[in-house]
Image (tube, rainbow, N blue to C red):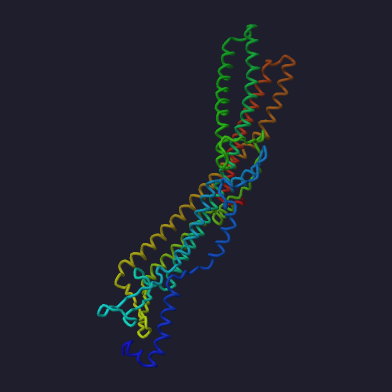
Amino acid sequence: MTTKALNQTGDGHRLLVPAAAAAAIALVATAGCTFSPQGEAALRRQADAAGRPFASSPQQRHPPRLPAVPTPRQLVARALIESPDVEAAYWQWRAAIEEIPQQGTEPTVPMLGATIGLQNGATSAANSMLQLTNMSSAPIEWPIKPLTQARAALQRAYAAGWNYRRAQFAVRRDTLDAWYKLVADTEMIGLLRQDERLLDELDAFARARIETGATSATTALSVEDERTELRARIVSVTARLPADRADLNRILGRPVRQTLGVPDRFPRHPAWRRDVDRILAQAVRRNPDLAALRREIRADRFDIERARLDYLPDFTLSLAASLDGVTQDPGGGIMFPIVAYQGIDAAIRQSRDWLRQTRAQLRSRRLGIAAHLVADLMLLDGDMRRIGLYETELLPRLRRMAAFAHTDVAQDEAPSDEPVRIERLHIQAQETILDLRLDAARRAADVDALTAARL
């Protein structure tokens, strides 16, 4: 029996109207829907809280002023909210979150059409039809398909969040590196100038001996050579100071030539615990790179599941009705994806290949981080041991030698310049200790970044 014939009977009319209404409701409710995976709302709240410092434009932000000589903690806090690198990573995270509803939305929307029937040049309500259907270019997908896509996007948004954390740890490490270098170069200038003054004293002693005939002129020339080399070092370190300050200001998001005070002495780094296995385990658990790759692996698994779902047939729904309400034609269609099995199988294999690639990247990155950490920890241990030897053995010995030299000079048993030469050895030992402290501090900052120590 045709639709028109059914409409001519009361029972048929009563049966057809609910069917048409059901088809219309199903079409409108399904097409264009967005399916949200569990965890999206919590992730958005987390991102909103993290993004408060970036809510306004950089020109409208008013961060607290740094003191004349800021501490490393104050510099890191400033860098985390003012660094362009951290802000860029944050907006990349937010962009990844906005991908979730896009992937979770049905690819089709309801479409309303109309046809006007002409009979002998005239129209009538019976011959004019309104049609409600899904968009002709895209069928309706079963909800599990966009939901699976959204779940994969959610995992990639989690990965982007870990990349944001990685940017924070990298900026902290870079801030400390730049600050350590600026402080070390500032202190080194002071040590080199002390050494220069001692060389001036040695030069005066040498010239006095030349005048008395106690030594040859080559002694004074040798001192002059040392002075020239020392002055070249002073020029080199002095020239580095503006570059050090500019690099630190860049990380802090400040004008690169803005002044920034530093302490006169390099800070002492606390002794570290020589528990390499514990530190490696902490890095495996908390390193942002590894955490991001683990999330990528989960996303790849959802991609495989989504590729398999292409074998689930999509469908279409439609409803046509004449303007006079007599004729109502609900309809539908179903796809046959099995005929495209080669492409679907290839997509499944490709998704598996991407998963294998990500797993290999995770193994490679884990090994790389472990090797990097072991190198940092061993060299850090070596630096701290050498510093201990210099401070507990060499420096006290040089101080005793200087005291003995003063006594010998007073008793005319040693050259008058002997205390000055010993003092120069003391200054040079301090320069070596300063270099070791700088290397140890920078390696410790690198270890903190790799193990994701608390910000």
Quadrant in the picture for residue 48: bottom right
- For the point 62% across and 26% down, which residue is it? 192
Outermost residue toward the left in this view: 120
Q: Position of residue 181 (x, y in %)?
A: 58, 36
Q: Position of residue 267 (x, y in %)?
A: 66, 38
The one nearer the camera, 98 or 368, is 98
Q: Position of residue 131 (x, y in %)?
A: 36, 76
The one nearer the camera, 268 or 378, is 268
- For the point 55% across and 61% down, which residue is it? 44
The one nearer the camera, 50 or 332, is 332
Q: How many marks overall?
A: 0
Outermost residue toward the top in this view: 212
Quadrant in the picture for residue 235: top right
- 213 versus 83 height, above or below: above
The one nearer the camera, 38 or 361, is 38
Quick check: 37 left or right of 117?
Answer: right
Whether residue 7 is visible to the viewer of this picture, yes or no, is yes
Q: Position of residue 416 (x, y in %)?
A: 69, 15
- For the point 58% across and 25% down, which residue is it? 234
- 453 versus 332 height, above or below: above
Whether residue 377 is visible to the viewer of this picture, yes or no, is no
Quick check: 136 left or right of 88?
Answer: left
- 397 versus 318 height, above or below: above
Identify the image quadrant of the N terminus. Answer: bottom left
